[in-house]
Image: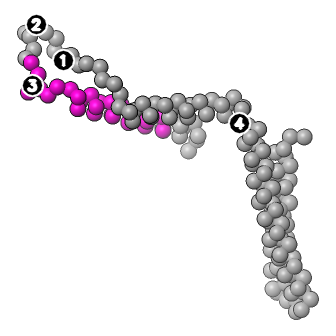
Amino acid sequence: MDRVRLGRVLGRGARMAARTVYEAVDAATAASPQNAPSRPAGGSARPVTRPVSPAPAVARTVRAAGRVQGSARAARSGVLTPVKRASRAVSLEIAGSFFGLFALSFAVAAWRFHASAGGQRLWVYVAFAAMFTYFACSSFVRARRLTPR
């Protein structure tokens, strides 16, 4: 699902939930029909209701929605772009380091196995060492592309 569409769906759900809570509070605080005075003959058909303050949960929802909109606005304006880029580059470099350690351990195992017997198991170690070397190198290349020059 697209991020924009997901945000719209979540926003609509939050508004509907707030409206439901508001209506429930309004219905709970309204005078019961048994205790209500009778309407005058010439009066309006709609009962007069007093304004009710929204529940604290609704107020929290509105404040949270404002914070989400503010952070989305900041993300769109480019304030967080350098931070996101730098954290992505660091995570790629950490992953590349781990891949490098795995590649080194498989290379050492392949060298030891080659010295003793050789065989089909040697090619498995070599294949894993090559695969993790590729992963390590590609992680560092991708991290390099993210950092400004």
Nearest to the observer: residue 5 or residue 93: 93
From the image, tell me which residue sits under label 4: 80
- Which residue corresponds to the image point at 61% horizontal and 33% vertical from the top-left? 71
Q: Residue furthest bottom?
A: 117
Q: Which residue is mark 3?
A: 35
Which residue is rendered at x = 71% and y = 32% of the image?
79
Q: CA distance from mark 4 to mark 2?
A: 62 Å
Q: Amino acid at mark 3?
A: Asn
Label 4 sits on a secondary structure element that is loop
Write the start and end of the magenta stretch as one range.
10-37
Quadrant that contains the N terminus: top right
Q: Is residue 102 above or below residue 143?
A: below
In the image, what residue occupies the spot 9% across and 25% down? 35
Q: Secondary structure at mark 2?
A: loop
Give 126 or 62, whichever is nearer the viewer: 62
Evaluate whether residue 80 shows in this view: yes
Q: What is the C-alpha distance between the residues marked 2 and 3?
A: 20 Å
Could you tell me residue 111's position as x and y percent? 90, 82
